[in-house]
Every structure is written in structure tokens, then in C-alpha cells.
Image (cartoon, helix red, strand yellow):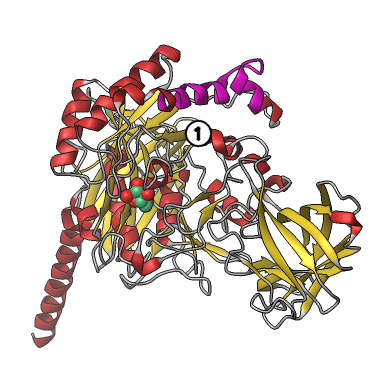
Amino acid sequence: MKHTLINKIAVCAFMLNGLFALAQQTNLEVDMANSISKIQPTMYGVFFEDINFAADGGLYAEMIKNRSFEFELPMMGWVEPNSDRHSMNKQSGIATIMTTAENSANPNFSRILVNNDKGYVIINEGFRGMGIKKDARYNLSLKAANQKGAIKKIIVQFIDKNKNVLGETSITPTSSEWKTYTAQLTSDQTEAKAQVKFTFEGTGIIDLDMISLFPEDTWKGRKNGLRKDLVQLLDDMNPGFLRFPGGCIVEGRTLEQRYQWKKTVGDVENRTTLINRWNTEFSHKLALDYFQSFGLGFFEYFLLSEDMGAEPLPILSCGIACQFNTGELVPLHELEPYIQDALDLIEFANGASDTPWGKIRTEMGHPKPFNLKYIGVGNEQWGPQYIERYKVFEKAIKDKDPNIIIISGSGPFPEGEYFDYGWEELKKLKVEIIDEHYYKEPKWFRENATRYDKYDRKGPKVFAGEYAAQSVAIASPDNKNNWECAFSEAAFMTGLERNAEVVHLTSYAPLMAHEEGWQWTPDMIWFNNLESYGTPNYYVQKLFATNRGTDLIAITKDGKPVTGQNDLFASAVKDIDKKEVIIKLVNTAANAQDLNINLKGKKLISNGVVLTLKSENLTDENSFESPKNISPVESAVKLKGSNIQITIPAYSVTVLIFKMK
Ligand code: AHR
């Protein structure tokens, strides 16, 4: 009797447990037969801005800072340790900055006077040092005019922080006229904080300019090209577009300091150095040595887009300086040069080689057009002045080439007066695509997965052009690229994807930051002089971008989209070309969730792939020491009939991929 009672209790407990487990399981349904809309190839792209030393000192692999002595303090980046400027008599030598009217783009050069054999040297400190690798080759070039043949030899050495020599080469300057000399350096050690020292044999005067040093091993082996590891991280994302050159840098703190693409093409020597707008933007993060050499200019951006199979997406000044700064306005009747810049850009990118700007592209080594399809007019402008200027641009661009798709902007915030006004006016103008920016707390991203559900399907399309979850506050230097931010963005991105009918382009911002040279955080990729790593946010972007699909399909719970019920978010696509069905699931809860997903409408191969991105703590991050701490892990899953039973971990992003028969 007693025995039977115990058995009954055990059976009841088991049943209850089973019921409980059943109650906990979430049932989802995927309709593979019906495509809701196309997913644009541009759905997931990258936003590049020269902020945080992302260009000079970053992607652009030049290692000499202030190579042409054009910074506001022309010897910035250079030191003369054995020269006492305050004592004429004891000087071993001295560098004087000369300015010539002959080269208005690059007027300064350094006149080196070597007085004696007491060891006058100049040293370039690089961008927070120079990263050099053991046995790798580095290409040096410089322009020199050796007056009266005074200087017999220039010895060029890599030195470490203790001034030990790591590698050496030399140049024999043979001409009293300006002439370019080249040499190659190697190092017998890997060093993150190297510098380059120039020592002079002989006494007298030698003029120097354009002192440049690049690793030989650049992206695609291009001479004086881009940093390979950084481009590789971008290329691995398979981005649908490359937005350049920003960001606020487009607008400039003043109109004078706006980005002018024409000054960034042609021979690098003739590209005029400009102060970087992030130089003094944040008093808590001053970067007084931050300038733009424009060695990474519009031609290089187009080339990079082409290399990655990404649509080039330039953003141009619309005649309004950054409204957070001066907000200087070009009067409408003086807007013509700004408009002409847009029209000439179309010719530079797409024109035949016998057109004036097509010729420049051809001379730069690219006779084939770049097939530019998009132009952005203005960055984060707001108010009636923007709308007035936008209209003038739109008319001129469409008159020149009606096929160019124009991107307009809705200001810096994702809601509020500027945003509402911008959208209302742009909608009246029937614009094609509107750029929206959101830098918000992680919770906002989780709560806004339905943001685009109600957007007018017949209205302008959306470019979510800049977004990132801020762990503390917008532009706070304490923001972190932590796991909570990353999975919250992923939750939001399921909403972007579910609304692919409206949302045509998206990009996280900013893209890159130098470990020591940054001004703004969070950023998707962090680097120092030798290494780089993707943040958890990077892996979220990469998971979505590399599993973009071609067609949106429905994934539902009780017939409704999965937008945060029980902290679960989901989207689904199929890829007609790869014959795949891809399901993205984001669990923002602190507990694992059991799912039963019914896949209907297509026959699938039963063995599937699971990519899981997870971490236990909201504050977990990746780092130089542990670059893949949070990165996707692949496993297998098997269909049971047309169902998948899967447990998704707490705080996780999961991608399921099945091949269609
Ligand atoms: O991404 C950093 C800055 O944020 C961009 O330059 C600007 O457009 C935005 O305000």
C-alpha cells in the first residue's frame, strides 16, 4: 500500500515536471514557402569615419606621423634629441620649417642643418609608436634636396623605446634638386612602439619632405596601401556597402574644415593635410596630433569598396557645417561649388576616361568605372535650411544622372522635433532613402525591435546609417563594447531584418578605434599598432551580414512576430542562391529557453548548422588578450520531421542554417 502511494506520488511529480517543461517550451513556426520581401544586398554594410585614428594611424598603413611637416605645429611627431634649440653655439644641428609657394597643397618642408659630427638626429614617433614585425619588410621613401652635396649619407634605423637599434638602412642623397629616394628596412624583433631615427653623415644643409614608411605586406600587396589585418576583418563581414568618409567629418566643425573629396585624389603629395575634426572635439579626449593626410582618400575608398564587393556610398557636405559646432551655412545662391562637387564625383566614379574627372580616375590606375549608385547629401543636418539645400542637390544630381539613388538625413536623433520635421518634409519630397541614427542605451534597442513595423511600406526607405548601444551614455568615454550592448543590438537587428521591405541599408558606428588614440567609444573593431580584434558587436554584425539571405520569410509565435515575448527575438530568411533557410534567434533572458520550431513549406536536408554567440555576463567583452572571448561557436542540429528542438542559452544570439532540397 505504502509502496503504491510512493509510486503514485512519483508519477504525479514526473507528470507535473513534464507539464512544467511543456509549459516552458516555446513553439515557433517558420513559413518557408512565402517570401515577404526581398532582402537588399545592401542590408548590412560598414560605416567608415576617420575618428579614433581609424585612417591615419589605422587603416591607412603609413607609419610616419606628419610626413610632410604640414601639421599646425609643423615639427609635431618629430623630435631632435641632440639639438638644443636654445643654444645656437652648442647645436649639433637643427631643423627649420620652410614654406614654399611652389607647392600650395604641400608648402612646408624641413631644412636640416647639420653643424658638426656630434650626432644630430631626427626621430619620428609614429602614431603612438610604430608596430613592426620581425623580418617583415618596410618601404621607406623620402624627398630630399641635398644642397651642395653636403650630406653624404642618411642612416635610417628602427629603434625601440630604449633606443636599441632593431634594423637599419641608408640613403645616399645624390642630387641638389628635389629627388625621391627609396630604401627598405627590416627589423630583427617585433616591437609595438618602435620609432624611426634619421642620422646624417657630413655637415651642411639638406631639405627633406614626404618622409614615408609603409609595411610591404599591405592589403592585396598594394604599394603604400591599407593595413591588411584591419581590411581582413571588414572583408570577412562581406559588407553590402561601404559608407565613407563619415559622419561629422563630412560636415567639418567649420565649412572650411569640411571634407572636400577633390583634395583627396591624385598624387598623395598634392593632397592637402587638414586638421581632423576630432582633434579638439572632446575636451576629455583631446588628440592634438590628429590630422588628415588624405592618403586614404576617395579613390582608395572606392577601391576598397570594389575589393570587398560593397557598394560605394559617399556622403557629401550639403553646405552646412556641423550643427553641434558652428553650424555655418552656405547661402543658397553660393551653393554651386558644393553641388558641382557632387556632380563631379559622379563623373570621377562613373565617367569615361576622356571626361575630366574620369581621366583622373584613369590616371590613378582605374580606367574601369566604379559603378557608383548612391550619394548621401549631408550627414546629421536638421531644420528647414537642410531641406532647402537638399532640394537643390536632388534636382542637380537627378538632372545629371537620374539613376543615382540619393540618401537624405533625418538628423542626429531617432525621435523628437528635428527627426519628425525632417521625416515629414522629406516624405513630402518623396525622397528615396532616409538616414537615421541612434546611439541609445541597450534597453532601447531591445524595446525598439518593432520600430519599423509601422513604417509606411510605400514611403521612403530607411538607411539605419549609424547605431550602437551605449553602455553608459552617448559619447561617454566609459562606454564599453560589452555583451549586453551586442546582444541588444542583435535583438534590434531582427527587427531591421523583419522590416527589410522598408530598411534597405544598416551600419554600426563608429567602425574602428586605436587602443590609445580613440576619442569615441564604443567602436566595432579595436586595434593597436600590431594587433586588432572584433568586439562582440562585430561578431553580431558579421553573423547577420554573412547570413543575410535574399528573401524575408515569416517566423511567428502564436501567429505573431517574435519581438521580445519572453525576451525572445527572431527573424528568418531564405537564400535562394545558396539554397538555405536561415533563422536568427536572440535570447535576452538570464535563463536558457527551449524552443520547438516547426518549419513548413519546403523540404530541407535534415542536418543543419548552429552558430552560437553567447556569454554568461552582461559586462563580458573581447580584448587584445582574449580577442575571441565572445565569438561564434559552430555545432550541429538535426531536424525531427519538420521540427527543430533546440535549447538556446541565456544571453545568446543563435543562427540556424538548413539547406533546402
Ligand atoms: O559615429 C560618431 C559620430 O556620431 C558621427 O561622426 C556622427 O555622425 C554621429 O553624431
Query: Is 557 on the left or on the right of 390, as rendered?
Result: left
- Residue 417: image quadrant is top left
Q: Is label 1 in a helix, a strand or a loop?
A: strand
As drawn, 515 above or below 111: below
Q: Which quadrant is home to the N terminus?
A: bottom left
Is 292 one of the magenta-colored residues? no
Which SS does the magenta portion mostly show? Answer: helix
Residue 600 location (% of width, % of height) = 31, 36
State the residue at coordinates (41%, 14%): 402
Residue 200 location (% of width, % of height) = 83, 68
Q: Nearer the viewer, residue 558 or 622?
A: 622
Task: Tell me the kind of residue under disc 1.
Answer: Pro
- Residue 256: image quadrant is top left
State the residue at coordinates (45%, 26%): 342
Task: Note whether residue 54 is visible.
Answer: no
Find disc 1 in the rendering and name its residue.
Answer: 312
Query: Is 468 on the left or on the right of 28, as rendered?
Result: right
Q: Nearer the viewer, residue 548 or 317?
A: 317
Number of on-image labels: 1
- Magenta stretch: give its range: 338-361
Is 352 one of the magenta-colored residues? yes
